[in-house]
Amino acid sequence: MALPDGTIFGLPIVMDTSDESIKVGDKLLLEYKGEKIAVMEVTEKYLPNKPLEAKKCYGTSSIEHPGVQMISICTARQVPMELLSDQTASIL
């Protein structure tokens, strides 16, 4: 996605989870429809402020905005994740 002047408009990848066992440095296997699609390394862990996240990403916290709706209702709990050992992650 790009702004009208051509500047790349990127958004951070934020995964919401209630799994307290996940920690910085862990590698997670992400799956979609039963297919392994990516390995993600956890680089930061924090409690989200979803209205602030929406405002910073989309310039609004209005629930009428589709991006704000996504932030408000979607969580990573809907994305199957599996904590990987270093050995498993290196062979994927």
Image (tube, rainbow, N blue to C red):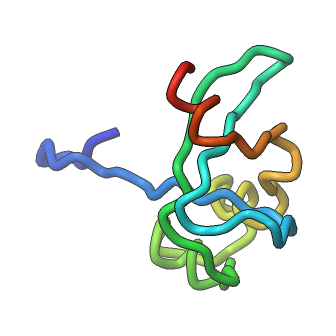
Q: Most extreme residue toward the left, as rendered?
A: 5
Q: Tell me the quarter of the picture where residue 40 sits.
A: top right
Left or right position of 79 against 27: right
Residue at position x 59%, y 33% from top? Answer: 87
Q: Tell me the quarter of the picture where residue 78 sits.
A: top right
Q: Most extreme residue toward the top, as rendered?
A: 35
Residue at position x 14%, y 42% from top? Answer: 6
Left or right position of 8 against 45: left
Q: Position of residue 42 (x, y in %)?
A: 55, 58
Left or right position of 84 against 33: left
Residue at position x 86%, y 68% from top? Answer: 18
The one of 64 and 39 positioned closer to us in this rendering: 39
Look at the picture and state if 74 lies above or below 8. Answer: below
Q: Position of residue 80 (x, y in %)?
A: 84, 37
Q: Position of residue 29 (x, y in %)?
A: 68, 35
Residue at position x 52%, y 50% from top? Answer: 41
The one of 76 and 3 positioned closer to us in this rendering: 76
Look at the picture and state if 81 lies above or below 15. Answer: above
Q: Position of residue 79 (x, y in %)?
A: 81, 40
Look at the picture and state if 88 lies above or below 10. Answer: above
Query: Which quadrant of the figure contains the C terminus?
Result: top right
Q: Tell me the quarter of the picture where residue 84 sits.
A: top right
Left or right position of 76 against 84: right
